[in-house]
């Protein structure tokens, strides 16, 4: 997983200088061996990485030669970077003595001397040195931090808050020890703090105020987003509840209709059987054949009459006595009429087979 950079690692002081010192690939032995030969005598005072310190010094030396660095800012950053590197190895006494010797020897080199780098080599303890470094970096990075806060750029408020707290701690009264520092030994106070101390304090207050405004705005946006999310969730829940209620109402209505239709079907089925079963039987017997002579037709007619009587009787027995009486009267009347008509028409139905069939279907 890729490591998330700190806020300091995104600021100009790190990007323009400290990171360049760390990642420098110019070996001093190849590029600056003659110019930095006097520094090799101090390798023992450079801690665990003397070559890395000499390579960084070579990088600044070459940038000055090429005209890419014009001010002593590069010397200050080199001084603070070397001091931070030594602070990881040496304790207070060794730290301040070693840093002072390295800085003094380095600033004797002509290219550094030309750019005013000789005015930074104070002999101070580790804690005071780190506070002065913090304030120097803030002085350089202020514009970038202000831009981040003013333009609503993606910013980790907690990281920014912690950074400003560290700056405030370094800027507390007496922290940089420059209140009465006017002697030649306190070059940091004379050459840097005297001209920039007030602006650092003022800019720190401005950023703290802007950070507070950003924090309040972010809290309001978070509350508004939470309210919108809650409102959307409430609407969704109401819509789901309404859909469920509608489904229940539809299911209840469908069940009621099904029950009603089922009851009607149960009541009407016997009536339909009563009305249509005899006629269906008669139709089936009349349509079972179309030829065979007069004897066959007479046999089928007599058979049909018998089937009709039996079917009617079976059907009628399923109903009440009143229905039975009415049904028998109607059916007997129908049978007598059909029988008489059959005898009267027997002569006429012997002409052709096709004609007999037509008469049978017509009677039906």
Image: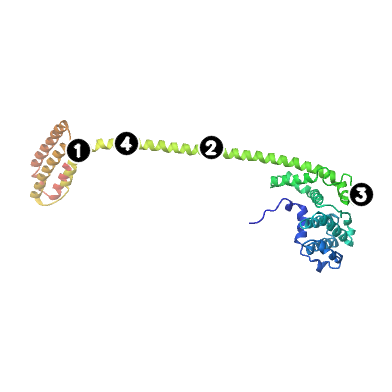
- Camera-side mark, 1 or 4: 4
Q: Which of the marked residues, 3 or 4, is nearer the chain's N terminus?
A: 3
For mark 1, what is the residue?
274
Could you say which disc has been placed on residue 234 in the image?
2
Q: Which of the marked residues, 1 or 4, is nearer the chain's N terminus?
A: 4
Between residue 5 and residue 245, name the one nearer to us.
5
Query: Picture coordinates of residue 254 (x, y %)?
Result: 36, 37
For mark 4, what is the residue?
259
SS type, badge 1: helix
SS type, badge 3: loop
Between residue 359 and residue 189, name the one nearer to us.
189
At 89% from the left edge and 59% from the top edge, which residue is drawn?
113
**Circles 1 and 2: CB atoms closer than 8 Å:** no
Q: Quadrant of residue 345?
A: top left
> Alpha-carbon neighbours of circle 1 within 10 Å: few (<14), some, or many (≥20)?
some
> Alpha-carbon neighbours of circle 4 within 10 Å: few (<14), some, or many (≥20)?
few
């Amino acid at each position: 997983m890729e490591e998330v950079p700190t806020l300091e690692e995104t600021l100009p002081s790190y990007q323009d200088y400290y990171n360049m010192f760390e990642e420098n690939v110019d070996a001093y032995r190849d590029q600056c061996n003659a110019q930095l030969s006097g520094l090799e005598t101090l390798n023992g005072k450079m801690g665990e990485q003397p070559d890395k310190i000499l390579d960084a010094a070579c990088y600044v030396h070459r940038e000055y030669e090429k005209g890419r660095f014009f001010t002593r800012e590069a010397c200050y950053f080199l001084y603070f970077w070397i001091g931070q590197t030594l602070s990881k190895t040496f304790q207070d006494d060794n730290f301040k003595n070693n840093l002072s010797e390295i800085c003094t020897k380095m600033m004797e080199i002509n290219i550094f001397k030309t750019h005013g780098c000789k005015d930074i080599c104070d002999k101070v303890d580790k804690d005071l040195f780190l506070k002065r470094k913090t304030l120097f970096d803030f002085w350089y990075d202020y514009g970038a931090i202000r831009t981040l806060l003013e333009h609503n750029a993606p910013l980790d408020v907690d990281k920014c808050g912690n950074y400003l707290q560290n700056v405030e701690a370094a800027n507390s009264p007496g922290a940089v020890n420059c209140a009465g520092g006017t002697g030649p030994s306190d070059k940091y106070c004379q050459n840097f703090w005297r001209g920039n101390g007030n602006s650092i304090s003022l800019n720190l207050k401005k950023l703290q105020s802007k950070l507070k405004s950003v924090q309040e705005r972010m809290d309001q946006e978070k509350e508004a987003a939470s309210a919108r999310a809650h409102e959307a969730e409430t609407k969704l829940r109401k819509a789901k509840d309404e859909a469920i209620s509608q489904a229940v109402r539809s299911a209840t209505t469908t069940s009621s209709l099904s029950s009603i239709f089922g009851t009607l079907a149960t009541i009407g089925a016997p009536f339909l059987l009563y009305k249509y079963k005899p006629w269906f039987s008669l139709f089936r017997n009349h349509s079972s054949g179309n030829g065979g002579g007069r004897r066959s037709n007479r046999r089928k007619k007599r058979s049909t009459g018998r089937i009709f009587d039996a079917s009617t009787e079976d059907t009628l027995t399923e109903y009440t006595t009143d229905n039975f009486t009415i049904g028998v009267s109607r059916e007997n009347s129908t049978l007598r009429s059909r029988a008489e008509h059959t005898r009267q028409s027997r002569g006429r139905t012997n002409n052709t087979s096709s004609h007999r069939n037509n008469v049978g279907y017509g009677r039906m």
